[in-house]
Structure formats: C-alpha cells, structure tokens
C-alpha cells in the first residue's frame, strides 16, 4: 500500500504517521498543503489518500481518481466535507477517524465555561495590569440554561457532562436520542434560541445548517425589541450618579436637578 497525506502537521502528525508506516509496512508521502486541483499530481502513484477537514467536491475526487487513488481517509470524526455519494460512484472507499467523543465534548465545555466567565477578557486585562471588575463579571453555568444543537455521539456526551454542573439543558436534533431525554428537554430551534444563555453546536456542516447563529441573533434582537416596546415609562433609568437606582418619575437624577434650578427640560 502507498499512502499520500495532505495538510499533514510536521510537528506532531508526521511522527505518528512514520511510526505507523514502519509498524504496518507501507510507503507514504506527505505535504503540508491542502489538496487542490493544482497539486493533485503529488498523489500520482499512490492508491490511498489521507486528508483533514478540507472540502472534497466531485471535481477534486475525479482528479484524484484519474491519478489512481482508490481509497480516501479523513483524519476527523466528521466527513460532511467529502462528497460521499460521488466517491462511491467512482468506486472509492471513504473512511473517517471515530475517536472517542470525550475529547471534543470536554473541549467544547471548556470553551463554554471560558465564555461564561469572560476568561479571555480577564486574561487580556490582567496582562495590562487592569484588575478592576467593571465589565468582567460573568455568569455561573449552574444557574444558566444551555442549548445543545445536535445530539449525536459528541452532543450526547456534552449533555451528560454538563448535567453534572446542574444547569438547565435544552436540546435540538431532528432525530431525538432517548438517552438524552433523561437529562435534557428537546425543544424546537426557536425555543432553544430564545431561552438559552449559551449554545453549543454539534451539528454536521451541511448547507441547511449554515447561518444558524445569525438566525439565533436575529431572534434574540427581536425579543429584546419586543421587551423594550412593552417596558413601562417608569422603568429603570440609569444616568450619572444615580446609576443603578430606580427612578419612579421617569426622569434621571440630572434632569430632576436641572428642573429644580428652573432650567428647561430637553425633549
């Protein structure tokens, strides 16, 4: 067997590939470049192709097939970046790397915790010797509602691990997982967007899943506008030294002071 690897990282992946090749007895070639129509010829004479998350549309598969490539493996769990149907039509076998979901799930939870507690902002401000708390107070995940979109192997693992934090969990998937229903509540996307404090995405990168977050933001903006329109005129007003106090009259402290001195009120 002869294998050619694209987009290979020399600082870690190359060593593993070399060890594997010596133990299993196959030849290999590699490049750090991503596969394209311009560098298809690098795989000439190889019957196996190894890639990562780069798109593999029909025209690129045709080009590699013409060079003699028979099998294609992606070093990822997901394989939606490959035109699977066309690969099968060409007689090419496709394989993915089904590594345990805990690594991805726990990394996602780490990022979620960092976002909730504004860790990136805190780290940046600490480097600047700014130890103030203004704008840095985060939100405890235990009192949050977390939405999980996609409850496959990774999404299900995320739900299981987040359940230990005691947060409220909402989930969405076209194919609900009975195992997830024990820990989370399946809802439609609009409900998940409206009620979640944080959302974690574990859906395949298919065309119908594009712009999910943009739709979420639009729905939240609409909800905020609706809230502002319904807010009574005597609601909280924050201005100057009176910030954080309830002003029953609807005027800020500065406006009341100005009016007491006989000055005209601005419209």
Image (tube, helix red, strand yellow):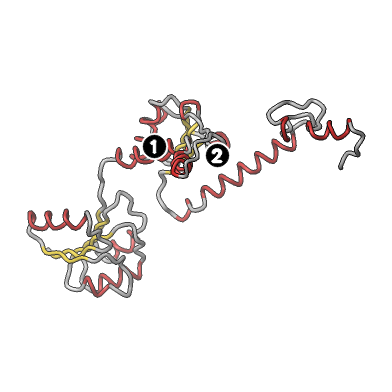
Q: Give the image location of residue 184, x and y in percent.
A: 44, 29
Q: Residue at x 38, y 38 (%)?
A: 110
Q: Give the image location of residue 196, x and y in percent.
A: 53, 35
Task: Examine the rendering and report whether any part of residue 211 can be seen.
Answer: yes
Q: Residue at x 84, y 31 (%)?
A: 257
Q: Quadrant of residue 111?
A: top left
Residue nearer the viewer, 148 or 63: 148
Q: Give the image location of residue 146, x and y in percent.
A: 48, 33
- Image quadrant for the C terminus? top right
Q: Residue at x 10, y 61 (%)?
A: 26
Q: Give the image location of residue 21, x and y in percent.
A: 11, 58
Q: Calculate the distance from the C-alpha at mark 1 to the C-alpha at mark 2.
A: 18 Å
Q: Quadrant of residue 29?
A: bottom left
Assess disc 1: are there few (<14), some (14-19) or many (≥20) residues with their C-alpha within 10 Å of its C-alpha. Answer: some
Helix, strand or loop at label 2? It is helix
Q: Which residue is mark 1?
A: 109
Q: Is residue 42 above or below residue 186?
A: below
Residue nearer the viewer, 210 or 118: 118
Which of the labelled discs sits on residue 157, or is there none?
Answer: none
- Image quadrant for the N terminus? bottom left
Q: Disc 1 vs disc 2: which is toward the camera?
A: 1
**Residue 152 appears left or right of 187:** left
Helix, strand or loop at label 1? It is helix
């Amino acid at each position: 067997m002869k294998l050619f690897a694209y987009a290979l990282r020399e600082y870690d992946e190359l060593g593993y590939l070399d060890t594997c090749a010596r133990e299993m007895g196959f030849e290999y070639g590699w490049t750090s470049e991503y596969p394209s129509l311009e560098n298809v010829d690098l795989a000439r004479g190889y019957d196996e192709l190894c890639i990562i998350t780069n798109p593999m549309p029909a025209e690129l598969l045709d080009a590699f097939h013409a060079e003699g490539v028979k099998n294609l493996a992606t070093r990822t769990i997901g394989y939606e970046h490959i035109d699977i149907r066309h690969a099968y039509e060409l007689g090419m076998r496709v394989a993915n790397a089904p590594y345990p979901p805990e690594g991805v799930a726990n990394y996602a939870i780490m990022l979620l915790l960092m976002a909730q507690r504004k860790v990136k902002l805190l780290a940046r401000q600490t480097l600047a010797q700014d130890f103030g708390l203004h704008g840095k107070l985060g939100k405890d995940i235990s009192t949050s509602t977390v939405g999980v979109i996609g409850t496959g192997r990774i999404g299900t693992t995320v739900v299981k691990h987040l359940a230990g934090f005691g947060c409220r969990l909402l989930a969405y998937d076209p194919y609900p997982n009975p195992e997830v229903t024990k820990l989370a509540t399946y809802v439609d996307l609009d409900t998940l967007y409206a009620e979640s404090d944080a959302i974690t995405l574990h859906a395949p990168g298919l065309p119908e899943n594009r712009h999910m977050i943009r739709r979420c933001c639009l729905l939240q903006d609409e909800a905020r506008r609706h809230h502002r329109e319904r807010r009574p005129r005597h609601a909280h007003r924050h201005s100057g030294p009176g910030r954080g106090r309830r002003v029953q009259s609807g005027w800020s402290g500065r406006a009341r002071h100005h009016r007491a001195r006989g000055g005209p009120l601005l419209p």
